[in-house]
Image (cartoon, coloured by chain):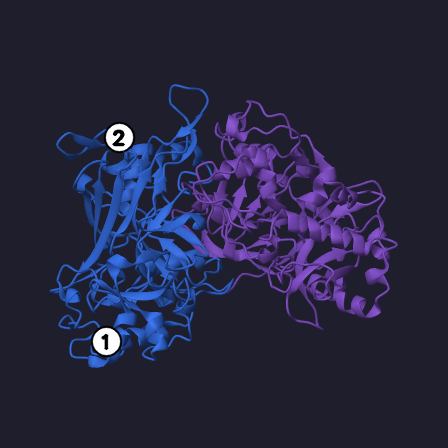
Chain colours: A purple, B blue
Amino acid sequence: MNDALQATLAPALKSWIESANDPASDFPIQNLPFGVFSDAVNPQPRAGVAIGDWIVDLAALERAGLVDAHGAFDKPRLNDFIALGREKWREVRIALSGLLAHGNATLRDDETLRRRALVPRPDATMHLPVEIPGYTDFYSSKEHATNVGSMFRDPKNALLPNWSEMPIGYNGRASSVVVSGTPVRRPNGQIKLPDQDRPVYGACRKLDIELETGFIIGRGNALGEPIACEDAEAHIFGMVLLNDWSARDIQQWEYVPLGPFNSKGFATTISPWIVTLDALEPFRTATPVQEPQPLAYLRHAGDHAFEIELEVLLRAEGARQPASISRTNFKLMYWSMAQQLAHHTVGGCNTRVGDLMGSGTISGSTPQSCGSLLESTWNGRRPLKLEEGVERVFLQDGDEITLRGWCQGDGYRVGFGACAGQILAARG
Amino acid sequence: MNDALQATLAPALKSWIESANDPASDFPIQNLPFGVFSDAVNPQPRAGVAIGDWIVDLAALERAGLVDAHGAFDKPRLNDFIALGREKWREVRIALSGLLAHGNATLRDDETLRRRALVPRPDATMHLPVEIPGYTDFYSSKEHATNVGSMFRDPKNALLPNWSEMPIGYNGRASSVVVSGTPVRRPNGQIKLPDQDRPVYGACRKLDIELETGFIIGRGNALGEPIACEDAEAHIFGMVLLNDWSARDIQQWEYVPLGPFNSKGFATTISPWIVTLDALEPFRTATPVQEPQPLAYLRHAGDHAFEIELEVLLRAEGARQPASISRTNFKLMYWSMAQQLAHHTVGGCNTRVGDLMGSGTISGSTPQSCGSLLESTWNGRRPLKLEEGVERVFLQDGDEITLRGWCQGDGYRVGFGACAGQILAARG
């Protein structure tokens, strides 16, 4: 990481956009996450960067000659920009950090350009930031895998033998990945009730969430050419929050032997802002000790976890306030993103720019730190009390879930914004 | 189906292209499958239709004003053409059938146009015909599921209870779907040997095939809006042959609980020509009796199976001739394509033009009709004799597998061409 890039991460850095200096803002000048937005003035989706309560319109900045991405910012998805490569991402980051820094007059004092290039965030509609050619979901929280194994298999041998040897993952459905704010319709499907011989068709009765992060591939690999674990982070553009909505009753009946299918394929929500790996650099920390030591292709020296605080909020239908139902941290994950990507490609599988890789449900070791209702209510046996007279085991129609994530810096935080969705009633 | 379309299917129809009238040709005038090709004269991939030993260059025909697809034929994938809808596919089919029919002079007698619009098939390079936004693989052969269940679980209860209630499927990896002729590199990965406590990293020792067909989505559905079983065939553009290469040793160690991942993600081969559902219409036949009767959302009146003869050929490294190692028929499949698509979308999952849906391994009830080496050699216990002194249990480096498929008409056959791939040694 060169000096210019390092300088964009300095905790002392401030912006002339005052809202970015609020210690509670997700989007200080140290963050500069990329997304795709539109607004009433210009309904054409285009690339932007969040800063405080504003969005910098990158297409407008490029037209003004202040950044250069060969026109890739004036597109409805970030893939073309991302495909320009890490040097370009860094060049743009450094340029934006300069333009937005306290004391820089170029954009601040050019009222015409400022009106064109700064859009109030509340006025914008956010879109899916990337076209997602492939979506893979891992299963890399030891606490989550242990909880699920205890519930559905054997509490004494909760972790299957393969779990400690590789980042277990499966292919998800990319078509139904939606951006935060998209309503989620409760799925219909086959449900097998314990007291009946045959399944019934009907609306899911055990609608759940999965608190996850996801990473976006910034540089793909060719078919047959694995990505080495040591090189894997250079292939990652950035991270998002991810809610892998899950229909537990449909899942239980369908998943043996080929894995979850309709129980997950109806919707997966991601947050609209992609926080770059560069912005997360100051929050890098040690991965948990791995015992047994992984096979050689899964080893990497140094620190490969990231300290990201995570929270799940549930606003029950009709409630005024959301209730916080979980708090945990991404650094607890047993397998790193680099290990996930090395494993995904070890057999030669190719990845492409924009591919989404989910972490798997992120759970801590207490009911208050579980990343799914399945775990925090222990499959419905321990209702969660949200407020006086309001309890939940699984989600009800009208309920709204919001995931939050942030890295706590000294006097600022690098946040992800909201990853939210409200439940609609099933189709009649 | 209107009269003009019906007329394109008449068994008596002949073409002025003589090789199309050979009863052994896969590509008579009744077929007219769509693909993407390039050649030395024009290295730009574009849409074509196979007829006998020739390819009709659709982009050239459109430039000559003989067909109209709003420029969609001059693209490296068929998605834009397919997205024009079923009326357009049929209009083009009827126009081509007319132009190629015995007695029609328009193209036959225009030497300049004929030179531009007809390319010898042996001179062409075939490309992946569609961009595949999503790849799903089903598991719909009762014989295959029974064989696998007998081998790995309990021969007395080989079929799991959910199998008879729904077309079990899972999400595959779309990025590694390749066109026939692409070499397939033996994957490395984690293998757990029975006499060792921990897995080893190494080259797959049980490399296998899966004989499948696949269908290509011609009209998608919006998120949250299921496709009814009765309407499902109208969403299908056509079919291909599909080889779902499988690393059985990697699969056995990784697949519980989330399904196959690296054991399948290294390559899936499809045939380059998409045979339209219209061309398959004369070969429609009854689906097997389904007992128990499926839930209402999986019911459809009429015939929804298709009589497609299937064959697997294995040319061992160094052998002069390929050996036929399996013969079976697509009509044996328990779940229809319509039922697969209705099930896939019942919870609201959206599909997109170009999505690929694999049938699952197609096996009959004898060792000679199995769609995988796993089954025909009973997990390596019964070697297949290919020729004097040459046996196989699983694939060796240099072996070439070719899938063949055809519908036998009266004096002609509607064929799929080859779906082939040769095994390369694993990376060192």
Work out whether residue B11 or residue B258 is closer to the camera in this orientation and state it.
Answer: B11
Q: Identify the residue at image location x=24%, y=56%.
A: B417
Q: Identify the residue at image location x=18%, y=42%.
A: B322
What's the residue type where badge 1 is placed? Glu
Q: Is residue A41 above or below residue A381?
A: below
Check chain identity for marks 2 and 1: say if they share one. Answer: yes
* Residue at numbered disc 2: B380
In percent of width and height, residue B279 lies at 25, 67
**How far, Cα to Cα, is label 2 from label 1?**
56 Å
In percent of width and height, residue A204 lies at 52, 53
Q: Is residue A83 above or below residue B73?
A: above
Asked which quadrant contains residue B10, the reply is: bottom left
Q: Is residue A239 above or below residue B46?
A: above
Mark 1 neighbour density, 10 Å: few (under 14) some (14–19) many (20 or more) = few
Depth check, mark 2 against mark 1: the one in front is: 1
Work out whether residue B97 or residue B87 is closer to the camera in this orientation and state it.
Answer: B97
What's the residue type where badge 2 is placed? Gly
Query: What chain letter is assigned to the residue under label 1?
Result: B
Query: What chain letter is assigned to the residue under label 2?
Result: B
Q: Quadrant of the N terminus of chain A?
A: top right
* Residue at numbered disc 1: B111
Q: Name the residue at the right extreme.
A: A103
Determine whether the residue tagged by mark 2 lies in a helix, strand or loop. Answer: loop
Lower position in the chain sequence, tag 2 or tag 1: 1
In percent of width and height, residue B187 lies at 40, 36
Is residue A210 visible to the viewer in this orientation of the structure?
A: no
Q: Identify the residue at image location x=77%, y=46%.
A: A8
Work out whether residue B294 or residue A357 is closer to the camera in this orientation and state it.
Answer: A357
Mark 2 neighbour density, 10 Å: few (under 14) some (14–19) many (20 or more) = some
